[in-house]
Amino acid sequence: MTNEKDETNLLIRMARKLFVLRCPESSAEDKASAKAEVLEAVFAEGLAGHYAALCDEFGWTVDQQKHGELKAKVAKDLEQLEEKINDAVENLGDSEVRNALTAKAEYVCKTGAPKKERELAFKIAEDKTVAIGHKLDMVFSQLIMSIFDGDYQHMKVLIDRCKALLEKGGDWERKNKLKVYESVYLMATRSFKEAGDLLLSSVATFTTTELFPYQTLVLYTVVCCVTSLDRVTLKKKVVDSPEVLSVIGDMPHLETLLNSLYRCDYAGFFGALPGVADIIKGDMFLEPHLRYFLREIRKVVYRQFLESYKSVSLGAMAKTFGVTSAFLDAELARFVVSGDLNCKIDKVAGIVETIQPDTKNTLYQQTIKKGDVLLNRVQKLGRVIDMD
């Protein structure tokens, strides 16, 4: 299942193929290829639980003979794992018992056992574990299952557990792994700025290849950072980053967009944007946020351009961006109405005038508003105390 087979976790590879199957814009050819690869992995790895669930979800015909063989294989493997656990308990030490219990927990997780059964298996293994590092590894295995299930609420619980364990100890490699897992959660919940900060700190020390290869890490880093970093910081941490430069050439649209944004080549930026949108559309973590990304990145580029001018003709601005005046007029109008751009459009004169924000007045209004809220709370508290 692709050339990432040696390092990317099986369930993550399957999740990406299932994303293709679930995506309404995927071509029939892509869906057929994804289905073939998923079924190949299911039968090769004996994933009985996943087979039944996938057939039910996608309306595939269940091959009863193969399904029976899968269930028999799982039962046999679990029996062998139980024998190893019993042997370790009777004849070996605590570390061997822990290893045997962990192997069983990871197996029931991989084969698609019910959630409660998976959690119980990991709890039993964790109760026999003393070392913080081994406990963290178990939580990472459960995080992978949460990603496969798309259960980001449970993923947050597991991330918090990792942080609690790391407060008691833990090596730098596992700390860096947690940063990547947390960045995936933050991307999935549309916290691009926080995700970008974590990804930037992981670029030079990335070892979490069970989730995705290094090139994908750079993709996520650039996508999260171009909407959240100012131009100077973007240049220092992303555009000139040796780690980013080492692989971004394999993604020409992304490289053009990043460099065009920094160099103020706005026509080049808009030329590369559709290609980057296609990349995002094909990624299971980023695709739900495609419209948000396109809106945020356009806000960034319009603000960057308008910062240099007190006023500029709509036609000249449209020519710079390589778009029509009508398109640009409609674009800017939406952002002005929503309060995302500090400018006004003189349609008669065909001019865009920038408005310098009155930061002092804004701060004053915010302070008054917060003061009113505080006074109301104090008055409510005073009434409660008087009643008592």
Image (spheres, helix red, strand yellow):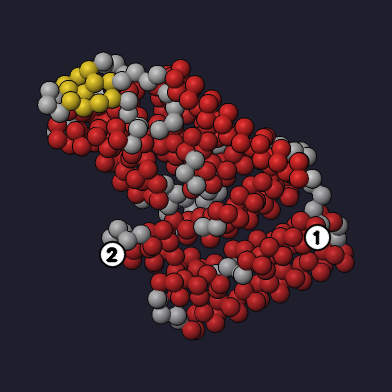
**Pointer 2: what residue?**
28
Answer with the quarter of the image where residue 327 lies. Answer: top left
Is residue 295 visible from the viewing direction of this image?
A: yes
**Pointer 1: what residue?**
97
Q: Residue at x 14, y 35 (%)?
A: 326
* Kind of residue indicated by mark 1: Val
Return the x and y of residue 147 as percentages of the image width and height. Answer: 54, 55
**Between marks 1 and 2 in the image, the one whose residue lies nearer the viewer:** 2
Residues tagged 1 and 2 counted as in contact (Cβ below 8 A): no
Q: Earlier in the sequence, mark 1 or mark 2?
A: 2
Q: Residue at x 28, y 41 (%)?
A: 275
Q: Viewer-proximal residue, 312 or 386?
A: 386
Query: Is residue 45 toward the left or the right of residue 161 in the image?
Result: left
Q: Viewer-proximal residue, 50 or 197?
A: 197
Return the x and y of residue 248 as percentages of the image width and height. Answer: 38, 33
Q: Residue at x 67, y 68 (%)?
A: 117
Is residue 280 visible from the viewing direction of this image?
A: no
In the picture as drawn, the residue positioned furthest to the front comes out as 386
Q: Is residue 371 above or below residue 114?
A: above
Q: Which mark is residue 225?
A: none
Query: Is residue 230 toward the left or the right of residue 28 in the image?
Result: right
* Kind of residue indicated by mark 2: Ala
Return the x and y of residue 1 as percentages of the image width and height. Answer: 44, 58
Q: Viewer-proximal residue, 175 or 224?
A: 224
Return the x and y of residue 295 as percentages of the image width and height. Answer: 33, 39
Q: Residue at x 47, y 44 (%)?
A: 190
